[in-house]
Image (cartoon, rainbow, N blue to C red):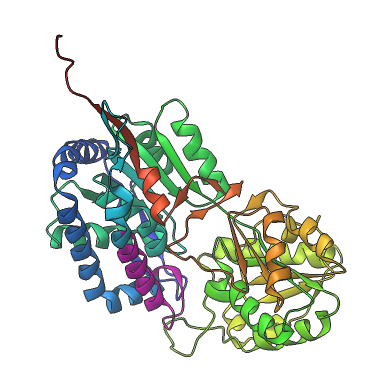
Amino acid sequence: MATGFSCISPVDGSVVFDRPYATDALVYATLTKAYRAFREWSRIPLPERIAACHALLDRIQAKADPLAHELTMQMGRPIRYSPGELQGFDLRGRTMLDLAAGALAPIQLPDDGSARRRIHKEPLGVVLVLAPWNYPWLTAVNVLIPALVAGNTVVLKHAEQTALVAEALQQAALDAGIPEGVLQSLHMTHEMTAKVVEDPRIAHVAFTGSVAGGIAVHTAAAGTFKTVGLELGGNDAAYVHPSADPVATADALVDGSMFNSGQSCCAVERIFVHESVAKTFLERFVATTRDYVLGDPTDPDTTLGPIVRHANAAGIRGQVERALAAGARGLLDPASFQGSARGLPYLAPQILVDVDDDMQVMAEETFGPVAAIAVVRSDDEAIERMNGTRYGLTASVWGDDLDAAEALVPRLEAGTVYVNRCDYLDPMLPWVGIKDSGRGHTLSALGYDRLTRPKSVYVRPLPKES
């Protein structure tokens, strides 16, 4: 049985760090400390918790440059983009703090003449945050900051590839003066994590990751009454409406498909383009994708980095090869990207056409720099095919006729629907998936509802004897 793990950098195959797994004794002590710290932390006045969380964010921003470089070495994102994740972490965190006072305020009900009635919002207890490697800062902050400011304590477990992020967050909390036990991190195997999910000291589990991982978390929690939030995979689709500017739309959708090497739960993987604009759209999509520079992500000129692991890259390439064997056409020559000579995990982007919905590349999440593009004849055909998936994270419609585009929104089966945007989270809006893309929601004022429970308060004078 493994006693530890190593992070192998996709950049150059070097070992970024080695870590031991937590012992059973450490896990027990961590959960006990979190459970005990909850009582004191939850009693601290809300303004003080808000100030403490601002201080935590300040500590992270003070180290943003080295943390961005560390992120690039852990998971391979080009260094020109890694600082953006730290900026997004800060924006989302502070947005949730700005919303806290209103979202957590008691709800005062009308006086019925005989009693005062209100609804308090109370923290749940210990929150277990299970964060992935692809956006380790952004996915963690969605729950971390609102959980803490609501009065919960947090145990954080990151994917092994980006485990340094969890350590940095724990240290930042201590440096910000947040009491010991309020935010802790653990390095655990899947088996250990399942046991922690089951532990009665955990009140809520927030998981971001694959559908298989979500099923494992749900199964582990099934014998308990704790709440579980799941943000899972996507197979997100876009529709290019006849009114769309095909050039501007192509540029935006290339970024939505290829950014972070397509390793995003809300990356655009399927594109349905109306036949009236298809020719120009495809020409521009191919030309824009060819501008990507695949190479060493520590080079500021690189715009496309390696896939996080060799196995992931091989799986993506396998999906493409199966699609080609089934009749799809690839519009790009991988050899034309100089960085592909490095071999896996440096995977060149690909654009597939002549695809059908039975192909794995259309039916399942690819999680790589691959765009599958189909030409459609009508809005109805586009909507039917966009909805023909077991996933439902995001969808987008693109067109200059905003009324026509927005009229399609109610027909799309997705937690977030964009018009003329994609691959983006607005922290003022709830982040939610339907179908196999998840359960529950984070962000926005509504995000606090998942991290608190209502307490009904009814106050009336003692009746007097007549």
Horizontal and vertical percent position of residue 191? 41, 38
Residue drawn at point x = 40 percent, y = 43 percent: 450
Horizontal and vertical percent position of residue 447? 40, 51
* Foreground residue among 266 and 159: 266
Q: Relative to residue 88, is residue 199 depicted above or below?
A: above
What residue span does the magenta drawing correspond to? Answer: 74-96
Check residue 223 for magenta coloring: no
Check residue 93 for magenta coloring: yes
Q: Relative to residue 162, is residue 33 depicted above or below?
A: above
Q: Is residue 418 left or right of residue 76?
A: right
Horizontal and vertical percent position of residue 344? 58, 72
Please count the marks in the image.
0
Q: Residue furthest top?
A: 466
Q: Relative to residue 171, is residue 304 depicted above or below?
A: below
In which quadrant of the rendered image does the C terminus lie?
top left
Residue drawn at point x = 56 percent, y = 68 percent: 423
Determine which quarter of the picture holds residue 177.
bottom left
Determine which quarter of the picture holds residue 201.
top left
In which quadrant of the rendered image does the N terminus lie?
top left
Q: Is residue 361 left or right of residue 340?
A: right
Asked whether residue 164 appears in the rendered view, the answer is: no
Q: Residue furthest front?
A: 466
Name the magenta segment's main secondary structure.
helix
Horizontal and vertical percent position of residue 111? 29, 34
* Foreground residue among 406 and 390: 406
Asked whether residue 59 appears in the rendered view, the answer is: yes
